[in-house]
Amino acid sequence: MTVIRGEHVVLRPVQERDHPLILAWQNDPEVAWWMDYERSFTLEVIHESEARAEVEGHPFLIEADGRPIGRIGLNKYRARDQVCSLYVVELWGLSTNERAFRSYEKVGFRMERFASARARATACTIRARS
C-alpha cells in the first residue's frame, strides 16, 4: 500500500516497528477511558490485531509534521476495482475531550455536528476539509 500525503497529514502503512507505539497508545489510561477499553493490551494482541487489520483492510499510521499522532484503517477496499476514493474522512470523539478536538482542527478537520452518544458525554462528528 502506498503513502497518502495530504496538506496537513501523511497516512502511511502501519509497520511492525509501529506496534510498540500503538501498544503504548492503547494502554494509555486516558485513551483507554475515551475508547472504553475494558482491559489492557499486550504486544501479542497488537500483533494479532494489526495482522487482522491487514487482511480486512489497510491500516495506516497518521503523521503530522513527521510525528505519529494516530492510527486509522481503510476497510472494504475491493481489489478488483484497483482504486479507492476518499471523499470525506469522518471521525468522532467525546466532546469533553477538548484537547483531542483542538489537535484534529489543527491538522485540518472542522466541526460539523454534535450527536448524542454514550452516557459519558456528547459525541460530535468532524470532517476533513474538502
Image: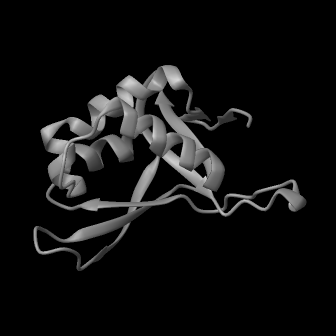
Q: Which image quarter: residue 78?
A: bottom right
Q: Which image quarter: residue 10?
A: top right
- 106 versus 80 height, above or below: above
Image location (x, y in percent) of residue 45: 37, 40
Image location (x, y in percent) of residue 114: 29, 74
Front residue of 14/120: it is 14
Q: Is residue 75 at all visible to an observer of this figure?
A: yes
- 46 versus 101 height, above or below: above
Front residue of 28/63: it is 28
Q: Is residue 93 left or right of residue 106?
A: left
Question: Which of the image's four quarters has the C terminus?
Answer: bottom right
Image location (x, y in percent) of residue 34: 19, 53
Q: Which image quarter: residue 1?
A: top right
Q: Is residue 90 left or right of residue 97?
A: right
Q: Is residue 66 at all visible to an observer of this figure?
A: no
Front residue of 5/17: it is 17
Q: Is residue 66 left or right of residue 24?
A: right
Query: In the image, what residue occupies the spot 22% across and 61% down?
Result: 94
Query: In the image, what residue occupies the spot 56% across and 39% down?
Result: 60
Image location (x, y in percent) of residue 28: 19, 36
